[in-house]
Amino acid sequence: MKTKSLTRPKVNVITLGCSKNIYDSEILMGQLKANEFDVAHEKENGAGGIVIINTCGFIDNAKQESIDTILRYAKAKKEGTIEQLYVTGCLSERYKPELKKDIPEVDEYFGTRDLIPLLKTLGADYKHELIGERLLTTPSHYAYLKISEGCDRPCSFCAIPLMRGKHISVPVESLIAQAKSLAAKGVKELILIAQDLTYYGLDIYGKRNLTELLNRFCEVDGIEWIRLHYAYPSGFPLEILDVMKNQDKICNYLDIPLQHISDKMLTSMRRGITKEKTIQLVNTIREKVPGIAVRTTLIAGYPGETEKDFEEMKEWVAETKFDRLGIFTYSHEENTHAFSLNDDVPAEVKQQRAEEIMGIQQKISEEINAKKTGSIVKVLFDRKEGDYFVGRTEHDSPEVDNEVLVDAKNNYVRIGDFADVEITDAGEFDLFGKIVS
């Protein structure tokens, strides 16, 4: 008589890169768990079993981190501390032939849309009834929700379309079902992610449909915050701002990567927008949604960026006073349109320019935070760290933005709960306060 093995295959999933990869890993883990695998995420010192690395291939630093991680686990496989090693995600999608040649210890490489082949290789079935179900790697009160995959934008510097393919929207009904499922599990904050949120729906509905989707999300019981990552500036649908203003559940927060302000740079980057229209758009966003926090991302050292171009960006950052800002140094990526240009800004100059921008932003953040002293803000608490409960306002996204710290010796709050906090002190990137309700 056949007996079912009591030993469940062990899988350790390692996730590198952005929130889209986090989402993909969570979907993979949900499928594996449904197939009775013993699944862990980034388990330290996990001996034996299977390791799956979900890689990033966005820019040089991310690619190097992915390669270093693969090599570390390839060594572990050689030494017999793990049994099988698989690699998936963006780096694998983009450089599979080279990786197979250079790191043959990996059992198999998979791309960004190879979930079913990966499961099949592991001896698992893809369970259609589990669409949207996943194992959260984030704290249980917030979750990323990917509303589309890929990108149709022509940005000269970006390799995302090479790794993620063309834009594909997820149907509204599927997304609402996912949101309801997450809410039933205690998720209070949905962080909507896509390479370009504003493009949502064009491929399947023939129109930009983010407005309808946001209104539908607001009807889901249990969801209290809805946060938007990332919006493309060219052709930005202004009706989204009306929804943000009128729907209390939508955070007054918008992540809109602008990349540069010099018309020469914007044209070379193929951004489809001018300096004048960029400034007008930011002003319109702030006028239509008073109190909104605008986050942007910039690039320093793009090919042909002169001191004049950089000074123009510096002046614009100082004048615009973005609530949140990040900056990358330009990475010269094969097969992108910009790869044909001369990468003529030295690495040390790129880094110096990035640091100058962040120095300006540090002062802006300090000024903005100082004005919040004495105010009362609604905070969602993510964790306890040392002597502090650590949370965020609606103006802050996890991992990348400011935090609110509350002294745990004199205050108490449950992780995952909202509380009103009076701000008593402010630093450059953090607020300090006490719970008032």
Image: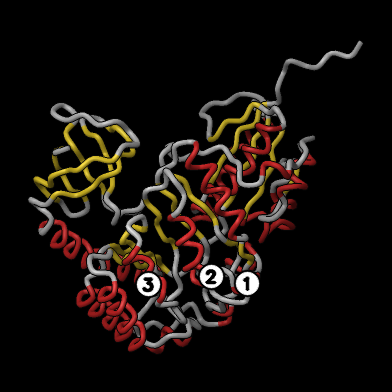
Mark 2 closeness class: few <14, some 14–19, many ≥20 residues within 10 Å? many
In the figure, residue 248 lies in which quadrant? bottom left
Image quarter of the C terminus: top left
Q: Is residue 131 left or right of residue 382?
A: right
How far separated are the C-alphas under marks 1 and 3? 37 Å
Residue identifier under label 3: 300
Q: Which of the two discs, 2 and 3, labels the residue nearer the N terminus? A: 2
Residue identifier under label 2: 209
Q: Look at label 1 and name its amino acid.
A: Tyr
Query: Which element is circle 3 on?
Result: strand
In this picture, is 155 found above or below 61?
Answer: below
Residue at point 16%, 30% (across, down): 411
Q: Look at label 2 and name its amino acid.
A: Asn
Query: Which element is circle 2 on?
Result: loop
Q: Is residue 86 left or right of residue 211?
A: right
Q: Look at label 3 and name its amino acid.
A: Ala
Residue 344 percent across, percent down from the top left: 45, 79
Residue at point 68%, 28% (across, down): 37
Residue 220 percent across, percent down from the top left: 46, 49
Mark 3 closeness class: few <14, some 14–19, many ≥20 residues within 10 Å? many
Residue identifier under label 1: 205
Residue 310 percent across, percent down from the top left: 31, 80
Mark 1 closeness class: few <14, some 14–19, many ≥20 residues within 10 Å? few
Seen from the viewer's position, the closer of residues 226 and 355 is 226
In this rendering, which labeled residue sits more in front, label 1 or label 3?
1
Q: Which of the two discs, 1 and 3, labels the residue nearer the N terminus? A: 1
In this picture, is 100 found above or below 296?
Answer: above
Q: Are marks 1 and 3 in contact (CB under 8 Å)?
A: no
Image quarter of the N terminus: top right
Q: Is residue 200 visible?
A: yes
How far separated are the C-alphas under marks 2 and 3? 33 Å
